[in-house]
Image: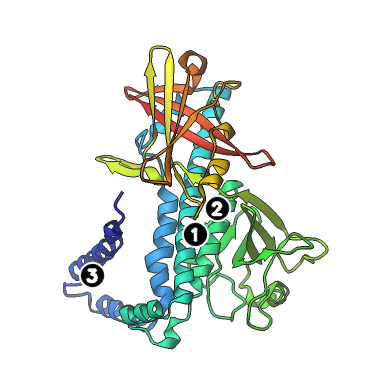
């Protein structure tokens, strides 16, 4: 993988292509007589866009929207499009349910890895923006913004917390919609009476949530926050959204994201519950992934675009499966690395062949202390139900179970492998 950032050019190229697309659409659509009014309306609408010059525009266009759009469409490169639906359609009863459950878990896990990756990227950007005055000056210069137009720089931190909340919601199978990319008049806000976006809409709770970054309270063990500005704290914000006249008819809540000892904690507070006595409306906890096995395998070849599956080889009666992984922990000593990622803590299981468990071996890549592979070998006859024939290849469904620390908590990685 290139480390010279040349691949980041895809963002710039996509914006250029967007400009070319709009140019073609507008020029070819409004170049004939009889379109005077619509041509003028396009001019007026464009002018309205032009005067709204602030940092949020670039964060929305450059990060927030592409991230959520990619999150929506992330999938595996194999099987190809509609492949899973064809596989499921040939099964019946409990077997069909097991395969569908695996597919759902696999999709959720890929999205978790992607959200986690971007939250880490934004964490670094946020730290750099706050500590490096020269970087801020370069950003203002590149965008041509004045000091008062730089409001929204803190939104980098907000988006980081928002994506961590997404990680938790996906992990728990909660249905939600990213409201942060929907600047709609019906979207509630306690900032003022004008339209402004929330962050996430939770379908089951019928609730729009503003996500805040915070920490765990030592006594209550609940996520809370208090910022530098007066009255910018959890009780103050909950008091503000009690005024139903400002909510445009939709219920509003405050989501607080905290991190502690390898976990993300997300609590959703609402103004009609006393959070000190009744607690939050929703309280979720998710373990952070110590390594990734899919976001490090993104590629496309011809018609196959998406996450590359792992490798499997079937020779005689033996199935050998190799999982490529990337350690996403920062500044980890060799002692911590061995303690945190050990073959003794990992077991490969097979969802369609319960009871079969296999220990593997770990090999760290030479010259790269972040990349490693895990290899497992099992009698193919014992896991034949977990090997599915499709398109001349064999798809292997498995689950990598990682025991976490002294608690022995299980982290589960759905493993998709393909053997030719």
Q: Secondary structure at mark 1?
A: helix
Q: Quadrant of residue 251?
A: bottom right
In this figure, which residue is indicated by the disc labeled 3?
A: 26
282 or 218, which lies in front? Answer: 218
Question: From the viewer's perspective, is residue 322 above or below residue 248?
Answer: above
Horizontal side of 255 relative to 365 (left or right) equals right
Per the model, the C-alpha gap separating discs 2 and 1 is 9 Å
x and y percentages locating residue 101 in the rendered image: 55, 34
Q: Which residue is mark 1?
A: 119
Residues at badges 2 and 1 in contact (C-beta under 8 Å)?
yes
Packing grade of label 2 (10 A; few <14, some 14-19, many >=20) is many
Please tell me whether residue 209 is drawn above or below residue 418 in the rendered image: below
Q: Position of residue 390 (x, y in %)?
A: 37, 24
Crowd rating for badge 1 (residues with CA inside 10 Å; few <14, some 14–19, many 20+) = many
What crowding class fits label 3: few (fewer than 14 Cα within 10 Å), some (14-19), or many (20 or more)?
few
50 sits to left or right of 271: left
- Which residue position is annotated with label 2? 167
């Amino acid at each position: 993988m290139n480390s010279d950032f040349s691949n980041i050019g895809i963002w710039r190229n996509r914006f250029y292509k967007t400009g070319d697309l709009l140019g073609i659409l507008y020029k070819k659509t409004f170049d004939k007589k009889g379109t005077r009014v619509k041509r003028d309306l396009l001019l007026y609408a464009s002018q309205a866009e032009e005067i709204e010059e602030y940092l949020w525009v670039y964060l929305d266009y450059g990060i927030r929207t592409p991230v959520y759009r990619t999150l929506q469409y992330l999938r595996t490169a194999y099987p190809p499009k509609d492949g899973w639906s064809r596989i499921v359609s040939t099964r019946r009863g409990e077997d069909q349910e097991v395969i569908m459950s695996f597919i759902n878990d696999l999709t959720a896990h890929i999205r978790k890895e992607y959200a986690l990756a971007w939250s880490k990227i934004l964490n670094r950007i946020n730290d750099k923006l706050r500590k490096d005055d020269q970087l801020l000056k370069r950003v203002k210069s590149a965008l041509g913004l004045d000091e008062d137009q730089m409001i929204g720089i803190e939104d980098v931190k907000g988006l980081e917390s928002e994506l961590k909340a997404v990680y938790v919601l996906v992990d728990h199978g909660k249905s939600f919609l990213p409201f942060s990319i929907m600047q709609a008049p019906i979207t509630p806000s306690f900032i003022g009476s004008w339209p402004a976006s929330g962050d996430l809409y939770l379908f089951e709770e019928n609730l729009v949530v503003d996500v805040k970054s915070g920490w765990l309270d030592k006594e209550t063990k609940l996520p809370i926050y208090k910022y530098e500005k007066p009255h910018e704290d959890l009780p103050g914000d909950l008091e503000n959204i009690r005024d139903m006249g400002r909510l445009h008819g939709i219920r509003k809540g405050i989501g607080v994201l905290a991190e502690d000892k390898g976990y993300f904690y997300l609590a959703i507070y609402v103004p009609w519950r006393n959070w000190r006595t009744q607690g939050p409306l929703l309280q979720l906890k998710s373990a952070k992934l110590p390594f990734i096995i899919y976001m490090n395998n993104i590629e496309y070849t011809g018609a196959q675009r998406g996450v590359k599956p792992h490798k499997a080889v079937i020779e005689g009666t033996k199935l050998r499966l190799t999982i490529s992984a990337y350690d996403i922990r920062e500044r980890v000593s060799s002692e911590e690395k061995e303690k945190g990622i050990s073959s003794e803590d990992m077991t490969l299981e097979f969802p369609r062949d319960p009871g079969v468990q296999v220990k593997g071996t770990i090999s760290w890549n030479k010259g790269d202390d972040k990349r490693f592979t895990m290899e497992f070998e099992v009698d193919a006859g014992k896991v034949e139900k977990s090997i599915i024939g499709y398109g001349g290849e064999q798809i292997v469904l498995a689950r990598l179970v990682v025991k976490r620390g002294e608690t022995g908590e299980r982290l589960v990685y759905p493993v998709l492998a393909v053997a030719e």
